[in-house]
Amino acid sequence: MSVKEIPDIVVGRLPIYLRALQHMAQEGRQVTSSQELGERLGISAAQIRKDLSQFGEFGKQGTGYNIEFLAGQLQQILHLDRVWDVVIVGAGDIGSALARYQGFSHRGFRIKMIYDSDPTKIGSQAGGFTVKDSGGMVAEIKAAGIKLAMIAVPAASAQVVANQLVEAGVQAILNYAPVNLVVPNGVHVQYIDPSTHLQHMTYYLD
Amino acid sequence: MSVKEIPDIVVGRLPIYLRALQHMAQEGRQVTSSQELGERLGISAAQIRKDLSQFGEFGKQGTGYNIEFLAGQLQQILHLDRVWDVVIVGAGDIGSALARYQGFSHRGFRIKMIYDSDPTKIGSQAGGFTVKDSGGMVAEIKAAGIKLAMIAVPAASAQVVANQLVEAGVQAILNYAPVNLVVPNGVHVQYIDPSTHLQHMTYYLD
């Protein structure tokens, strides 16, 4: 089956499965089941089996999934059998916290550079990185061949930064600015906006 | 139509529509269309019309949507016609950045308290708040009647914190810890994990 046919919503669940499997592996576990994964994740066992079956046959009826094997397969499917370099644009509170965050390296990512346009921030330290001048960003990202970026600039600047990143060859953007981005086909964007997530939940509250 | 019947994926798009409408209002705009909204959001106009039609009749064929009216309706639907108090648990990098974040107040949320269990953090300042001892958290949240919380503690502590928040009466949790939480029915959880978002996108990259 061509990977092109997999619905994006299914693709989006694979990192969740992978994360749960890696937690289980850390706990010293070797085998799990769609039932157990489902209970941990709040997803039905049938959904998990259906999602995974789109990519192959990873477990045997009755014996469950080998955790290490399935995690390895998911890493391959998600192209995490390599390390991806990532740039951060914006060295404010969020960008600096991302530069310091220790949770990327064991998930397949390596922060390479952090940029800002503010002269008071350029040259300062953020998580072991020296904040670079965003004036040189396009050329430097292009030269380094980096395909992933996180945007942590104010909403009013985010589209301009996204345009520059696309020009630099970036193909996937994780946007922390609370604004939607318009990007060409083939460039992927994901959004992190705590207010949006909270608003999704207040719908259900009285 | 009972609001219970609306698919969660539709509910999740409403805050995105609201955010775009509020940006347009800030730009001084008064009327928009499903076409224009769709172009800003990368969602088809037909999908937007279908989503909105589940909640009522907000625009007229040919004249589009009145931005202020539609935004007001979406705020009511999402229960944002009031201000929701929110607690933060964890005063590390992420929790402190959330405490300082200026993007909540005009989106319907007010940070009320930030907690940590680390004696070196308790009593310190984070975004104008004094970090409180999480030992008193359950009783204080219960007394204040707060229903929303953000978890920004290490993965290993997140489930314990979630249990305490549920005990305190919290009904919606935005979890920044990179681990799935098990909560009772009726308690809502949303997740923010940059690695998961990045992994979703590397699937599509070579």
Image: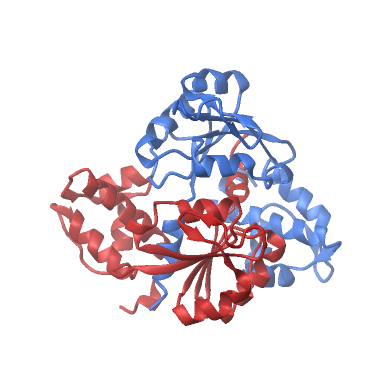
Chain colours: A red, B blue
Q: Position of residue A139 (x, y in %)?
A: 55, 81
B58 over A112 or under it: above or below: above
Q: Position of residue A49 (x, y in %)?
A: 28, 58
Q: How many marks?
A: 0
Q: Quadrant of the C terminus of chain B?
A: bottom left
Residue B142 falls in image quadrant: top right
Give the farthest residue toward the front. A123
Left or right of residue A31: residue B97: right
Please tell me which residue lies in front, B105 or A119: A119
Left or right of residue B8: residue A64: left
A38 over A159 or under it: above or below: above
Q: Position of residue B203 (x, y in %)?
A: 39, 70
Left or right of residue B130: residue A22: left
What residue is drawn where x is 58% and y is 81%?
A167
What residue is drawn where x is 34% and y is 68%?
A83
B103 over A140 or under it: above or below: above
Q: Position of residue B115 (x, y in %)?
A: 52, 29
What residue is drawn where x is 33% and y is 53%?
A19
Residue A119 falls in image quadrant: bottom right
| Residue B44 in sight | no
A117 over B95 or under it: above or below: below
Please tell me which residue lies in front, B58 or A87: A87
Residue A145 falls in image quadrant: bottom left
| Residue A97 in sight | yes
Give the farthest residue toward the left. A63
